Image (spheres, rainbow, N blue to C red):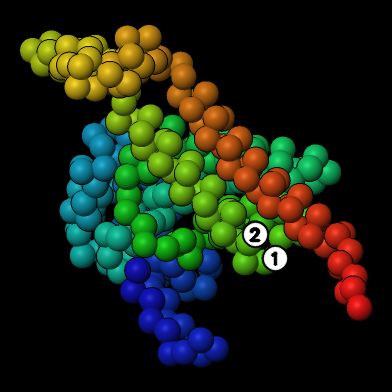
Amino acid sequence: MGAETSGRSGTVGLSAGIERAWGRRPSPRKGPKPGLDLDGIVAAGVSLAQADGLGAVSMSRVAAALGVSTMALYSYLDSKDELLALMVDHACGKPPGHLAGKGWRHNLAQWAATLFDGYLRHPWAAHIPMSRVPPTPTQIAWLEAGLRCLAGTELTDQQRLSTVLLLGVFVRSEASLARDLSPPVEPDANDTASRTSYGQLLRQLIDPQRFPEVSAVAATGAFDDQAGIDEELSYGLERILDGIEHLLQRDRIATCTPATPTVT
């Protein structure tokens, strides 16, 4: 992302797009086109991804869509990676509000469901590689909202952070899987595979003697149930939340259990 750190407590050099996203750097006064700004550049990238997929997004194509030169974009952004990070910000949208008072489990479930919906509306976003939480305003807002869901629990700050990151990775993975398993909206009439469900392919390919368990599940039609995408999310989410609840209960028991008296 172009950020360089001089030390844990030192200053951090932020890239141009990230600084502008936070309002810390003004747009160039002498721009190549009146009205060109960072939001417009990101929106153009999102439009390309929505129409033609993530592979269609390049600095040159975004510039062409805006009617400017490719070099003009580098007055606002340092790299394509920076553009992609800001596009994810756009795709995720704002985290849910008004979650206080409904309990940490309900709040986290709502948090995850809202994030999942954002990825489903922008399926390319789940396929953008990320090595860390991008330091963009919307991503930090999601992190803040997730941590707030767990405020007041007995979890340590590190456990709260790990829980929110785990849920974020899970939701992103489920959205990516939903995109990969969903049939194309307009399948190629000459491509048999594009018109065949994953379950149908498995039933044609799998030898029940070699893969008896997968064969049995495929025979039930479980792989064909596109309506089950939401159920898959709910099932995995509930199991993660069960684990957090178990951790909280275990810690409460450990705290309340009196020490065994020493026999002398």
Q: Say what secondary structure mark 2 lies in.
A: helix
Image quadrant where one finds the C terminus:
bottom right
Which residue occupies the foreground of this view, 5 or 180?
180
Left-right relation of 134 to 211: right
Image quadrant where one finds the N terminus:
bottom left
Q: Say what secondary structure mark 1 lies in.
A: loop
Going 47% across and 89% down the picture, which residue do you hit? 7
Please state the horizontal and vertical placement of residue 79, each as a whole percent of the image.
Answer: 27, 65
Which residue occupies the foreground of this view, 50 or 183?
183
CB within 8 Å, label 1 to label 2: yes
Which residue occupies the foreground of this view, 70 or 153?
153
* Residue matched to label 2: 160
Where residue 18 sits, quadrant-wise, is: bottom left
Which residue occupies the foreground of this view, 92 or 181?
181
* Residue matched to label 1: 156
Q: Is residue 189 visible?
A: yes
Left-right relation of 23 to 215: right
Where residue 240 sits, quadrant-wise, is: top right
Going 32% across and 50% down the picture, which residue do you hit? 128
- The residue lying furthest to the left in this view is 190
Please state the horizontal and vertical placement of residue 34, each as a whole percent of the image.
Answer: 36, 57
